[in-house]
Image: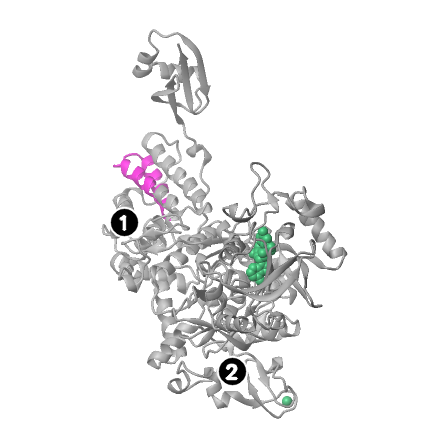
């Protein structure tokens, strides 16, 4: 049977997709005894349709998954749905469609698109976080963590989004606005449930030692987010009072330059300290600050403002009296909520001192150069370490030494302590939303008069999300939606059996994505979140692919959760993921991020429809290294399509002659050239995939195909057999990138089964040696020529070849040779006078 001349992806692709699915080709746990690879992509929130960012994300994982399967690994490559969340609920508020219905539709269409792109998922492990079989384990974790005091209930100021009518995380507040809806965010005092992630701040920092294969950008963002500061707390006395003001500072070495002390407006001492004549002004300032959100008060560009309280503090080292102020830039919940201000050595204090005419006194001199002057002559704060000046017994010490001695002195005399502060806050995770995991707690006025919350027993799980009348409940206004569902709210108390009310808040969806990677390993398990043995076999995840925008939320939260799971005896790893790959953005053809707003969105489905999945895949993978952004180009899509057609055409051209051809003699001439090209391609593609350089891998396949075209007509049995081998190798190296085309070529050439089940062939080392090397020939360091000599050639042969070159001859003519520099494999340089 001869091969169709035309490349028809629309006919080929669905056929292979069906076969892969019917035969369970991508099922994990196929190779007992084989080493494992767990390849994971961040599970999507199923919005309406897939966009190119999704396509790229999953392709990166798919290349790995297919490649490692061919390298003999037992590959785990699952997919699921981060199905709870705000967008479905907000859409429901708008158009009255139940979030469950919308989510189910979206999941179906996402899945269909994924199938049409040929992703190698093990769909038997599909997980949907909005199903009670999943979220009951969120509730189970909640109960376990409540017992361990990792979950607690607190009253605190929360970020309240006036648009979404819900509490949002600090990370979601951008310039005082909600990241999602861009409405104003205000502070609100509310009870909430929180995780004590700050207990793990240091562990999360230490664990980074294991994250060598994570992008530095992500680990440094996490490091900054956790924000460890080494410093001291020191007590300042208050003049005429027994009160003490404890400040936190990282620069106790500057303490002799402290010219005022600043408290946060909401510091508990403010009311006590304000003197009668200042009271009115102080209260007005406090009230004005209370009306602003924390982010608004402390934004980078926000104007520093403050008022004098009328009271004075006493410096613990010099005994000097300094005025006590309150100001917007000092936060009540960082350090101790009080700062010793040293304007000569801190930029913020400097600006503030200039604004309010407070003294500026230099106490640290730079190690070299002029002495800095105090007062009006100092142009800017000197914020680096140096040598202490005007600091009593400490004068002359280096900053570092002074910090050590001063810290020790404070501790010894019980006037302070050496301490570490973290910027990271506990994770408040309760949300006033419907479409999330119900929190398994009830409130009983008899057993729990303070409304601390009574946890339900494990046997009461899952607490199911009730079905609702969407129009009546999802109004976007007033109480949390679940409070409007009496059948849900009214329940009985597990302690006294009397009437009780259920918690009506639900969990942040970031809880769902904290542990889904472990659920995939035993998705049907109904006695635990997942089977311990499966986790032991498969964790940690070997490669995790997703967007860098998750750097400080999801990627930090799930590292935290990984530690909790270990403490609960569920896993034996500290870190969830060995290698993280953060993919770049796919921009529109205009260079702007693809978005409805710019009208520059290219729908993946339209590309698949027009050119087929393999072209879409080749294009996206060839467009640039995974971590880099790229701009969409229709021309390059056409280019990828032409390449796929070229592959097809060369296989079709030689089909009759080469299919099944074998030869046992020695390969020479054209036949040898074909074999060399094939084995070099094998080597190059394998190495490029390991390096994550999929674009150069594809470039390698392209060169290989060019070499096959150069072979033109096949005459001898050796040439035919070489071509048969080459097409076989071509189909195998194409498998990670263009799997349908790969399988069809293999099939046309008489090989059975999907190529992803075949072993990635080892290249023949004898066929990949570069047998000719280019040498640069220089005369007095100037390039004169390039000569090609056999790789085995020594200096004499290389010189002979170089000196035979006309240009080199001319350059050497009539000169006396002083020296010849010979660099094996690279160059020969003639030094002449
Ligand atoms: C005196 C001083 C002198 C400071 C100097 C700095 C330079 P990081 O590194 O970010 O932890 N600070 C302390 N608590 C604060 C609060 N609640 N709100 C605002 N600022 C606060 O910063 C620690 C420094 O930030 C501390 O060290 C303190 O100012 C200020 F030449 O103390 B420093
Ligand atoms: Zn009770």
Q: Which residue is mark 2?
A: 504
Whether 403 is drawn above or below 613: the answer is: above
3 or 260, which lies in front? 260
Q: Is residue 329 visible?
A: yes
Question: Which residue does the image show at 37% across and 55% down from the upper left?
Answer: 585
- Prevailing secondary structure of the magenta residues: helix
Nearer to us: label 1 or label 2 = 2
Label pair 1/2, CB-CB below 8 angstroms: no
Name the residue beneath numbered marker 1. 636
The magenta segment: 702-731
User: Is residue 526 or residue 327 the one in the foreground?
Assistant: 327
Q: CA distance from mark 1 to mark 2?
A: 52 Å
Q: Position of residue 106 (x, y in %)?
A: 37, 72
Q: Nearer the viewer, residue 505 or 804?
A: 505
Helix, strand or loop at label 1? It is helix
Helix, strand or loop status at disc 2: loop
* Quarter residue 816 falls in: top left
The circle drawn on residue 586 is none
- Residue 680 drawn at (x, y percent): 40, 37
């Amino acid at each position: 049977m001869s091969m169709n001349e035309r490349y028809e992806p629309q006919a080929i692709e669905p056929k292979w997709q069906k076969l892969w699915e019917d035969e369970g080709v991508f099922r994990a746990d196929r190779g007992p005894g084989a080493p494992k690879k767990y390849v994971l992509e961040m599970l999507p929130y199923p919005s309406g349709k897939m966009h190119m960012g999704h396509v790229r994300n999953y392709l990166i994982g798919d290349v790995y998954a297919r490649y490692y399967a061919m390298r003999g690994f037992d590959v785990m490559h699952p997919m699921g749905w981060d199905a709870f969340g705000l967008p479905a609920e907000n859409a429901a508020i708008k158009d009255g469609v139940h979030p469950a219905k919308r989510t189910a539709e979206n999941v179906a269409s996402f899945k269909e698109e994924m199938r049409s792109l040929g992703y190698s998922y093990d769909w038997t492990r599909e997980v949907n976080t909005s199903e009670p079989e999943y979220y009951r384990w969120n509730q189970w974790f909640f109960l376990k963590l409540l017992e361990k005091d990792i979950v607690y209930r607190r009253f605190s100021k929360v970020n309240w989004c006036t648009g979404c009518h819900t509490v949002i995380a600090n990370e979601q507040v951008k310039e005082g606005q909600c990241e999602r809806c861009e409405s104003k965010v205000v502070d609100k005092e509310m009870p909430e449930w929180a995780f004590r992630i700050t207990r793990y701040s240091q562990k999360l920092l230490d664990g980074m030692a294991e994250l060598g294969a994570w992008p530095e950008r992500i680990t440094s963002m996490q490091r900054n987010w956790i924000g460890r500061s080494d410093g001291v707390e020191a007590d300042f006395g208050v003049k005429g009072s027994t009160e003490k003001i404890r400040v936190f500072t990282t620069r106790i070495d500057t303490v002799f330059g402290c010219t005022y002390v600043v408290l946060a407006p909401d510091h508990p001492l403010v009311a006590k300290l304000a003197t009668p004549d200042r009271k009115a002004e102080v209260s007005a300032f406090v009230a004005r600050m209370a009306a602003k959100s924390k982010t608004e008060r402390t934004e980078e560009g926000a104007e520093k403002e403050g008022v004098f309280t009328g009271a004075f503090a006493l410096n613990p080292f010099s005994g000097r009296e300094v005025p006590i102020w309150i100001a917007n830039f000092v936060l009540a919940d960082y350090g101790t909520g009080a700062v010793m201000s040293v304007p000569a050595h801190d930029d913020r204090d400097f600006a503030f001192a200039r604004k309010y005419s407070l003294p500026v006194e230099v106490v640290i001199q730079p190690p070299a150069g002029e002495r800095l002057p105090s007062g009006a002559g100092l142009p800017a704060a000197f914020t680096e370490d140096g040598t202490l000046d005007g600091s009593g017994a400490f004068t002359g010490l280096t900053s570092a030494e002074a910090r050590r001695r001063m810290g020790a002195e404070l501790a010894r005399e019980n006037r302070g302590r050496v301490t570490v502060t973290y910027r990271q806050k506990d994770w408040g995770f309760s949300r006033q939303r419907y479409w999330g995991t119900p929190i398994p707690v009830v409130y009983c006025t008899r057993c729990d008069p303070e409304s601390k919350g009574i946890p339900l027993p494990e046997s009461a799980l899952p607490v199911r999300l009730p079905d609702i009348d969407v129009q009546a409940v999802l109004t976007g206004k007033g109480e949390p939606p679940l409070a409007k569902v009496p059948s849900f709210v009214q329940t009985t108390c597990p302690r006294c059996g009397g009437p009780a009310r259920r918690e009506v808040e639900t969990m942040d969806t970031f809880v769902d994505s904290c542990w889904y990677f472990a659920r995939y390993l035993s998705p049907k398990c109904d006695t635990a979140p997942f089977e311990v043995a499966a986790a032991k076999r498969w964790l940690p995840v070997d490669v995790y692919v997703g967007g860098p925008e998750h750097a400080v939320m999801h990627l930090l939260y799930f590292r935290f959760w990984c530690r909790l799971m270990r403490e609960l005896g569920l896993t034996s790893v500290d870190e969830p993921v060995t290698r993280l790959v953060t993919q770049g953005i796919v921009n529109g053809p205009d260079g702007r991020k693809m978005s409805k707003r710019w009208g520059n969105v290219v729908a993946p489905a339209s590309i698949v429809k027009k050119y087929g999945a393999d072209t879409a895949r080749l294009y996206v993978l060839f467009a640039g290294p995974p971590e880099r952004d790229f701009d969409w180009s229709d021309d390059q899509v056409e280019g990828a399509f032409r390449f796929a057609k070229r592959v097809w055409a060369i296989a079709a051209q030689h089909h009759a002659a080469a299919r099944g051809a074998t030869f046992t003699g020695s390969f020479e001439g054209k036949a040898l050239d074909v074999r060399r090209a094939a084995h070099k391609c094998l080597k190059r593609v394998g190495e490029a995939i390991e390096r994550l350089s999929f674009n150069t891998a594809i470039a390698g396949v392209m060169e290989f195909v060019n070499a096959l075209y150069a072979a033109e007509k096949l005459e001898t049995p050796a040439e035919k057999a070489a071509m048969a081998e080459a097409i076989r190798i071509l189909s195998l190296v194409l498998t990670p990138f263009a799997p349908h085309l790969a399988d069809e070529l293999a099939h046309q050439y008489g090989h059975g089964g999907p190529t992803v089940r075949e072993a990635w062939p080892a290249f023949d080392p004898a066929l990949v040696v570069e047998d000719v090397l280019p040498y640069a020939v220089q005369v007095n360091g100037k390039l004169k020529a390039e000569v090609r000599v056999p790789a085995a050639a020594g200096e004499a042969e290389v010189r002979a070849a170089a000196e035979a070159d006309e240009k080199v001859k001319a350059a050497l003519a009539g000169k006396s040779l002083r020296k010849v520099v010979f660099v094996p494999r690279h160059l020969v340089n003639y030094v002449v006078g």
